[in-house]
Image (cartoon, rainbow, N blue to C red):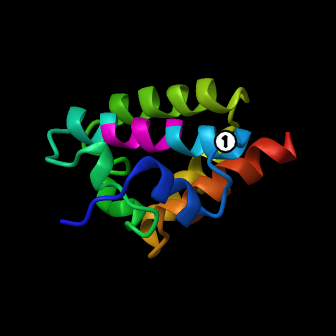
Amino acid sequence: MMTQTDQGFVKACGFAVDSEEGKAALALRRELGGYGRAADWSLKTEDICADTKIVDTGILHSADSIDLVEFTVRVEELIGVKLTDEDVWTLIAAGQEEMKVKDWIRCVFDIRKSM
């Protein structure tokens, strides 16, 4: 499995390492890694690369909807915005496509900007 340093991850996402977006991207990456472990996946944070498919992170494994709700609340806390039901479905629907983590993070940022 490929791994990526924090700096490499941020750069591959298209952000400056010390920027607000870069820091938020790392926070979201850590949250993805934490959720993956909670969902009994063997995924570690450093295994989540910018080009990892979002569905492969395990966040959209809806076997336990409580976990998905908790994850949504954490994303809201990280970005400082209350997500609407429509926003949550947008983020969940990302897993039905071949969306990569870097694109999913940009989607989260686009939601934040629209608020």
Q: Quadrant of the C terminus?
A: top right
In terms of secondary structure, where does tag 1 sit?
loop
Q: From which residue to which does the magenta span run?
A: 27-33
Corner quadrant of residue 19: top right
In-front residue for pair 26/54: 26
Residue 50 drawn above or below residue 21: below
In-front residue for pair 31/64: 31
Of all residues, the one furthest to the bottom in this rendering is: 98
**Residue occupying the point 68% across, 35% down:** 83
Disc 1 residue type (three-letter):
Asp
Of all residues, the one furthest to the right in this rendering is: 114
In-front residue for pair 7/106: 7
**Residue occupying the point 21% across, 37% down:** 37
71 vs 33, left or right, is right
**How many neighbours does mark 1 have within 10 angstroms: few (below 14), some (14-19), or many (20 or more)?**
few
Q: Position of residue 91 (x, y in %)?
A: 56, 53
In the rendered image, which residue does mark 1 sit on? Answer: 18
3 vs 68, left or right, is left
Residue 3 drawn above or below residue 74: below
**Residue occupying the point 43% across, 70% down:** 51
Q: Quadrant of the N terminus?
A: bottom left
20 vs 4, left or right, is right
Residue 27 drawn above or below residue 11: above
Q: Is residue 86 visible?
A: no
Q: Position of residue 95 (x, y in %)?
A: 43, 63
**Residue occupying the point 47% across, 74% down:** 97
In-front residue for pair 2/102: 2
